[in-house]
Amino acid sequence: MSQIFHPSTNYLSRISIGAIVLLLGGAGAALFGINKSPYVSRVAIPFDQPVPFSHKHHVAGLGIDCRYCHTSVERTASAGMPTTETCMSCHSMIWTNAPMLEPVRQSWATGKSLEWTRIHDLPGFVFFNHSIHVNKGMGCAECHGRVDQMPLMWAENTLYMEWCLECHRAPEKRIRPREEVFNMAYHRPPGAEGEQLAAKLMAEYKVQKKTDCYVCHR
């Protein structure tokens, strides 16, 4: 019986299989890169807001504590957003005619809340509790970055699951004294002193390395 396929077919099939493997690998790498890119994660990209609020001015410049605006961060799952009344506690006396603050004045006059654009928006199937992290000695800057240096607000980290798990697997690398949680410029002591402090805080605050799925997915 004569040969159906030319001998060169063996060579061509090997080339084809190799090309397909390389193509699939390249496509996977490209998708992985796109998923990590700011185009998808929105990291380091300021969002448009009804008022161009500057954390750098209010936190670093004026020394306003995070809890003045985010009033429920120590007690509930949500950090809370400032009400118009909070803004007007200052801006009824200063910068009263500033054009950029017109949306605030309109909100105050009409009673309609400002519609802020959410920066850190976790999926609905992810549970996150601010109060737990704050009371376990996790600083605001660990997730939100140095907001005291941001003239406009942007996401500092992706908040992807792999990023969260880095901390959940080794919380001792990020833990700090509770009184330093809202200190944007806090740095742990270097070397053995820092490791001893971390071990002490881990025991004192009863911090556990929680990586089970149900911790965040409920």
Image (cartoon, rainbow, N blue to C red):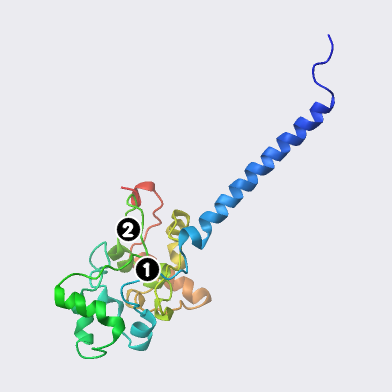
**Which residue is depicted at the point 50% across and 62% down?**
38
Task: Please name whichever residue, 103 or 154, is drawn nearer the observer in this view of the structure.
Answer: 103
Residue denoted by label 1: 138
Query: What secondary structure is marked by label 2?
Result: loop
Give the quarter of the figure containing the N terminus. top right
Q: Residue 80 carries which label?
A: none
Task: Please name whichever residue, 72 or 58, is drawn nearer the observer in this view of the structure.
Answer: 58
Task: Please name whichever residue, 206 or 215, is drawn nearer the observer in this view of the structure.
Answer: 215
Q: Where is residue 188 in the image (x, y as percent from the top left)?
A: 46, 76
Q: Position of residue 202 (x, y in %)?
A: 38, 65
Amino acid type at circle 2 is Phe
Q: In this image, 38 relative to 147: left or right? A: right
Q: In this image, 85 relative to 128: left or right? A: left
Q: Which mark is residue 128?
A: 2
Amino acid type at circle 1 is Met
Is residue 68 among what the camera can see? no
Whole-Å distance between the Cαs marked 2 and 1? 13 Å
Q: Residues within 10 Å of mark 2 (few under 14, many from 20)?
A: some
Q: Quadrant of residue 96?
A: bottom left
Q: In which quarter of the image is residue 142?
A: bottom left
